[in-house]
Amino acid sequence: MRSVIDICDLSVAEIEKLISTANDIIENPKKYSEKCHGKKLATLFFEPSTRTRLSFEAAMYELGGNVLSMADAGSSSASKGESVADTAKMISCYADIMAMRHHKEGAPLVASTNATIPVINAGDGGHNHPTQTLADLLTIKREKGRFDNLTVGLCGDLKFGRTVHSLINALSRYTNIKFVLISPEELRIPGYVKKDVILKNGLKYVETTELDAVLPELDVLYMTRVQRERFFNEDDYLRLKDSYVLTPEKLKLAKEDLCIMHPLPRVNEISVRVDDDPRACYFKQALNGKYMRMALILMLLGEL
């Protein structure tokens, strides 16, 4: 029995296998429609979610399984003071696999060490979001055809953006990757990500506050929202929330085959006028998340 808490829990070979499986699911959905018949996925979301939660549930239903879903954290025994460890032990009695999102970094790891079923980290605070990264990787592979030799721009909240941290970890294992880190000074990439991933792996990178200046060199642009829920000071959030807004006018500077991504939800950082641009991939990215979660569930349940 194994869990996936960090994207680096998966080897490069395993990620390639998941991508291959996801592509096969896209081409042959009926082949997988009963793979998880009789199995149950528990979704425990202690933080609000739309895409991640619904895509996990859609993934299990499309595999022929069932879902046990906690309505919200306030209606769970966590509101009575139950520990994450005890919750994990209890859910293990009812389900075959569990997806957990929690506002505290490390909570899914604690769950995985106490559960007797696989645990998938569906996002823990500002730390990690491995299944979003799997969605990101499938999107990049389908749009660009490769992971090597890419210049990847990461724009917005790089300090609290767990999707950014996970994606940097994942792409660090490929060849000739260059990161362009675009953010306000206050929202720069955390020192531990720079030290333990970027510098440790000898990756090329630049840090800048200017999106327009670097846009022409990017193969992939990963936009993120400034996350109100991570700020202690409302004034700081209001000052920084509209630091970057991608518009059709700005995209005139970009490559014709740029892949524009966003983990969603967006607020103002991508104009709705960009949605019709063929380079806009963020809704494809959301759909790809379902396919990669289907593949991951199959892997962890021993069905691949």
Image (cartoon, rainbow, N blue to C red):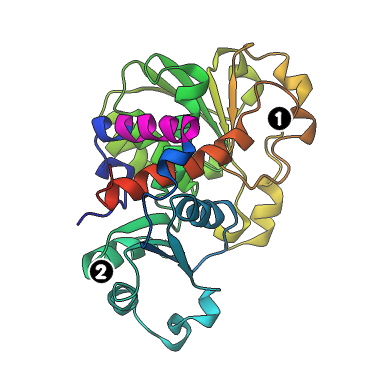
Q: In this view of the protein, can residue 241 be seen by the observer?
A: yes
Residue 74 is inside the magenta segment: no
Residue 26 is inside the magenta segment: yes
Q: CA distance from mark 2 to mark 1?
A: 43 Å
Three-letter code for the amino acid on which mark 1 is drawn:
Leu
Q: Are marks 2 and 1 in contact (CB under 8 Å)?
A: no
Q: Quadrant of residue 87?
A: bottom left
Residue occupying the point 42% across, 46% down = 294
Viewer-nearest residue: 226 or 100: 100
Which sits earlier in the primary sequence, circle 2 or circle 1? Answer: 2
The residue stretch that appears in magenta = 16-28
Q: Give the numbered dot on residue 115.
A: 2
Q: Quadrant of residue 278?
A: top right
Q: Position of residue 144 (x, y in %)?
A: 49, 18
Q: Position of residue 77 (x, y in %)?
A: 44, 84
Residue occupying the point 68% across, 35% down = 244
Q: Residues within 10 Å of mark 1 (few under 14, many from 20)?
A: some
Give the residue number, with chain letter if any, for mark 1: 246
Q: In this view of the protein, can residue 164 be seen by the observer?
A: no
Q: Position of residue 229 (x, y in %)?
A: 59, 60
Viewer-nearest residue: 151 or 41: 41
Query: Is 88 left, or right, of 151 in this rendering?
Result: left
Query: Is 103 left, or right, of 201 in this rendering?
Result: right
> Which residue, as the protein is rendered here, is positioned at the far bottom?
80
Residue occupying the point 71% across, 19% down = 251
User: SS class of the residue under badge 1?
Assistant: loop
In the rendered view, tell whether residue 8 sits above or below residue 88.
above
